[in-house]
Amino acid sequence: MDKFVIRGGLPLNGQVEISGSKNGSLPILFGSLLAPGPLLLEGVPTGLRDINTTLEILRQFGAEVEKRDHQVAIEVPTQGPVKAPYDLVKKMRASISSFGPLLARRGEAVVSLPGGCNIGDRPIDLHIQGMEALGAKIRHENGYIIANGPLKGGSVYLSGPMGPTVLGTQNVMMAAAGADGVSVIEGAACEPEVVSTADFLRTLGVKIEGDGSPTIRIEGVGQDGFASLGGVTFTIPPDRIETGTYILAGAAAGGRVEVRNCRPKDNLALLSILKNIGVPLEIGEDSVTVTGVDQVTPCDVATLAYPGFPTDLQGPLMALLCKTDGVSLITEKIFPDRFMHLSELRRFGAKVRKEGSTGIIEGGAPLHGAEVMASDLRASACLVIAGLMASGTTQVRRIYHLQRGYESMEVKLRGLGADVERVEDRQIESETVQG
Ligand code: EPU
């Protein structure tokens, strides 16, 4: 197991290139199950663990997968296994998005219920309701959902008590693409990753309207509608959460960072918050330049479905808010328990606490390097930013979480002048003992 060793307090300066979107790639990779291919996906962040888990799952479904530098070529036979086993689904919940494409193309899907998760309860009831609305017959057996087609167009409502579901919308869109007839999804998620999935399906020849709004209309091509489809290329857009993370890191560490190859319009909520708290930004067509600040003004924000402020940037923003001259509030309205980073932030000396689903940050306390434990992907990013801000040395353990979603983070940060090393945990432990 590796960890990051960060010698903090150095400003970040220079340019950083954003990779293709993780959450954009995952459903689209599973969407490749809809057609025989060959299909070529470009701009895939092939260095990420979640991408490699996905390729492993696709191979289990009988796909031939070839990974090159930021490219994946896929061919998928019509017949083949339809089971997504627990061992893989528990590693990565996005594997639930194999459900729709498998059901549409192979008429059957056997998908494990995902089980526990570090960021809180994540049911998949809306995915199931969506498939049922398209005519799927579903039963539960020994922790698995067994679904059978054929699918036909239907009317689907996809919002729950916490709002719309992102993967649920993508999953049902992909199922509807291979269903017979027209489907309409109401209460759909509007995230840019949903639009990318729609763009991908359009590349496969599917007629879709309304993606990016709560009502999406899909003209299904039927179970054999993609039977002769091949030679398709699709490019994954840049990662808006990686973009936001580097913007926040730049603001927090000081210096001047140009975040390149991004889509600023996908991050308007974050950019608006940063402007309001006094972070200087220059926004270009496909870049954002941020100038670090010694202090930001406090704020009161909530995570919300897109175009609201994303839950995936809640932790990284919390690190920056330790630099205020007052009290800030961040309320989680997507995953009310997603605060595992909070007690780790305290180890840096931060004055943070939680009341209900609100994180309360009393700014102004200086951060000192600490030994901390990453609990999930975005919590890890929060701790890395705190480590960059802190004086002295920080060790962030269990950074395998980071490798799920940030390509070569230590290399990118070093390119900006940070002193970050990725080392094997045991080696450093014994050095500490010797010291
Ligand atoms: N929900 C239900 N029923 C469902 C599905 C979701 O009640 O059937 C609830 C969830 O419990 C949550 C809310 O609806 O309270 C939203 O969850 P959503 O389904 O939108 O989340 P997701 O699609 O499983 C994706 C991202 C997450 C990101 C969320 C919210 C991927 C692979 N994952 O998850 O990303 O936090 O949307 O934007 O796209 C990450 O990258 O670190 C990550 C966790």
Image (cartoon, rainbow, N blue to C red):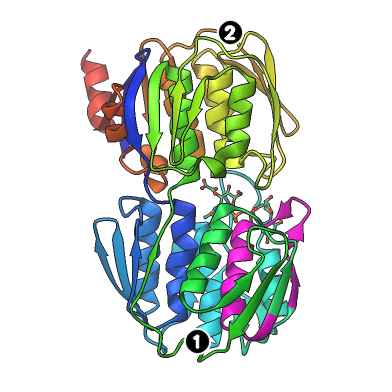
Q: Position of residue 258 (x, y in %)?
A: 38, 29
- If the image is split into quadrants, where does the N terminus sit? top left
Name the residue: 55% across, 13% down: 323
Which one is in front, 279 or 157? 279
Tell me if residue 251 is in the magenta stretch: no
Q: Which residue is mark 2?
A: 364
Which one is in front, 339 or 200? 200
Q: Is the residue 170 above or below the residue 418 in the image?
A: below
Q: Position of residue 407 (x, y in %)?
A: 34, 44
Name the residue: 64% across, 14% down: 297
Amino acid on which disc 1 is placed = Arg
- Is residue 213 found left or right of 262 in the rendered image? right
For numbered disc 2, what is the local secondary structure?
Answer: loop
- Is residue 316 found left or right of 135 in the rendered image? left
Quarter of the image holding residue 70? bottom left
Mark 1 and mark 2 lie on one chain; the one further toward the N terminus is: 1
Q: Which residue is mark 1?
A: 106
Q: Is the residue 353 above or below the residue 131 in the image?
A: above
Span of residues in magenta: 155-182
Residue behind label 2 places its C-beta within 8 angstroms of ligand 1: no
Q: Residue furthest front?
A: 285
Q: Position of residue 96 (x, y in %)?
A: 54, 66
Name the residue: 35% across, 56% down: 43
- If the image is split into quadrants, where does the C terminus sit? top left
- Give how far apart the Cα atoms at labels 1 and 2 are: 57 Å
Amino acid on which disc 2 is placed = Gly
- Is residue 62 found left or right of 138 in the rendered image? left
Name the residue: 42% across, 66% down: 29
Total marks in image? 2
